[in-house]
Image: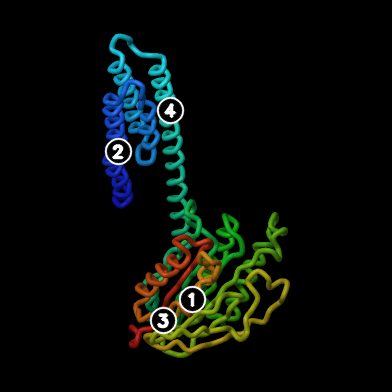
């Protein structure tokens, strides 16, 4: 909460400082108009003061500046012709300033109400995402882990990418996935798969049996009343890995998901699945036989898991982000430091805004396993 309040205080301080700009403009126009020849009237320029104030101020600030502009226009009229109260031209300009000021105040009121609603939506969506998709622990068994989920939608920071981890007797099971589609439907499908993984990953079942159960869970959801129209159209790409605690090769079943990358001494190696399975949710159509691939993961190396929001991110020319090429030569051995650099590099490549959600996990196996 203190961080949220501090975030609100900074714009307020900036607005108070910037209010000097329209006030200085009002004073400048008034002085120049008073010194100008009688046939030159600059009072119409006063409307610029309240017009620029909504850029940094709220309704009260806009109303104050508009009132000062009206007072200045009235003073200009009285100074120019002291014998006549106000000319018809001065009266027209004053009425115009009043109307413009009232319109801007109304605009600021509506804008602030919508901003409050948007802030509440963001807060609720972030809270929901923390419940559905909490960050992975920094340490899972002997593994050091860093996870990140930069969502593409700024208005509602929640999407269909997912990841989860579970401990078993002999190691750690990890899943990363991407639901086809967006919005609440994608969130529902992601929550369903995460729940199924958390229930079944701890069981003493083979990796193939676990993936078969996850596929059936997605298919069963699509068979619910009202969901039959989505059957065959909704699916989830996923990679499910089993990382043993005490050395050994990592086992993996890839269900149509981008291949993991192992980085060691700055050299990335893409671990392509030789026997990939179809995405989860299509099992009832293809009846797959899940075959396990394996690859080495040595101590001090980094294992990078990601969704296609990373590799399909585009720069201004439409070129995809070349992940393996970009991370070649990176010397970061700490998962958090590596992931932070990857996030900054990705956002720089796309110009600061992702067009799709992107989930990333970086894992390190220490040289000496923890007891």
Mark 2 element type: helix
Q: Earlier in the sequence, mark 2 or mark 4?
A: 2
In percent of width and height, residue 48 lies at 38, 33
Can you tell which of label 3 and label 4 is closer to the viewer?
A: 4
Q: Using the image, determine if residue 74 lies above or below residue 278.
A: above
> Which quarter of the picture shows residue 167?
bottom left
- Which mark is drawn over residue 302? 3
Query: For mark 3, does the 10 Å Cα neighbourhood hold few (<14), some (14 to 19), or many (20 or more) residues?
Result: many
The spot of residue 237 in percent (x, y) is: 59, 71
Density class for disc 1 (Cα within 10 Å; few <14, some 14-19, many ≥20) is some
Task: Report whether residue 79 is seen.
Answer: yes
Residue drawn at point x = 35 percent, y = 41 percent: 56
Asked if residue 72 is positioned above or below residue 325 in the image, the reply reads above
Real-space Cα distance between discs 1 and 2? 47 Å
**Residue 336 screen position, x and y as percent:** 36, 72
Q: Which residue is mark 4?
A: 100
For this rendering, which residue is in front, 213 or 250? 250
Contact between marks 4 and 1 (CB within 8 A): the answer is: no
Alpha carbons under labels 2 and 4: distance apart: 18 Å
**Relative to the observer, which residue lies in front, 345 or 18?**
18
Relative image position of residue 179 (x, y in whole percent): 58, 65
Residue lying at the far top in this picture: please name it: 83
Mark nearest the camera among 1 and 2 is 2
* Residue 323: numbered disc: 1
4 or 1: tag closer to the N-terminus: 4
Query: Where is the C terminus found, in terms of image quarters?
Result: bottom left
Q: Are marks 3 and 4 in contact (CB under 8 Å)?
A: no
């Amino acid at each position: 909460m203190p961080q949220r309040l501090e975030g609100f205080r900074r714009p307020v301080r900036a607005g108070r400082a910037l209010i000097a700009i329209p006030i200085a403009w009002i004073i400048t126009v008034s002085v120049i108009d008073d010194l100008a020849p009688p046939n030159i009237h600059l009072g119409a320029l006063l409307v610029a003061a309240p017009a620029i104030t909504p850029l940094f101020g709220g309704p009260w600030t806009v109303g104050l500046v508009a009132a000062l502009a009206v007072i200045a226009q009235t003073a200009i009229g009285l100074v120019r012709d002291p014998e006549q109260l106000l000319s018809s031209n001065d009266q027209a300009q004053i009425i115009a300033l009043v109307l413009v000021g009232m319109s801007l105040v109304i605009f600021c009121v509506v804008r602030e109400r919508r901003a409050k609603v948007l802030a509440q939506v963001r807060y609720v969506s972030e809270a929901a995402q923390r419940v559905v998709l909490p960050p992975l622990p920094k340490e899972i068994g002997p593994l050091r882990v860093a996870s990140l989920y930069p969502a593409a939608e700024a208005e509602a920071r929640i999407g269909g990418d997912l990841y989860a981890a579970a401990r078993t007797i002999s190691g750690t099971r990890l899943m990363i996935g991407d639901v086809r589609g967006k919005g609440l439907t994608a969130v529902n499908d992601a929550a369903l798969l995460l729940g199924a993984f958390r229930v079944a990953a701890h069981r003493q079942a083979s990796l193939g049996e676990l993936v078969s159960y996850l596929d059936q869970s997605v298919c069963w959801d699509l068979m619910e009343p009202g969901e039959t129209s989505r059957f065959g159209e909704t699916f989830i790409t996923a990679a499910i890995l089993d990382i043993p605690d005490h050395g050994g090769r990592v086992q993996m079943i890839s269900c149509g998901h981008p291949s993991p990358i192992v980085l060691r001494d700055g050299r990335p190696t893409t671990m392509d699945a030789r026997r990939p399975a179809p995405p989860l949710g299509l099992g009832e159509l293809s009846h797959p036989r899940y075959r396990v691939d394996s690859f080495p993961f040595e101590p001090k190396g980094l294992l990078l898991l990601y969704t296609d929001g990373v590799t399909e991110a585009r720069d201004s020319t439409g070129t995809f982000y070349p992940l393996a090429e970009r991370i070649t030569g990176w010397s970061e051995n700490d998962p958090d430091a590596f992931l932070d650099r990857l996030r900054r590099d990705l956002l720089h490549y796309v110009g600061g805004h992702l067009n799709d959600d992107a989930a990333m996990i970086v894992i390190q196996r220490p040289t000496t396993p923890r007891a």
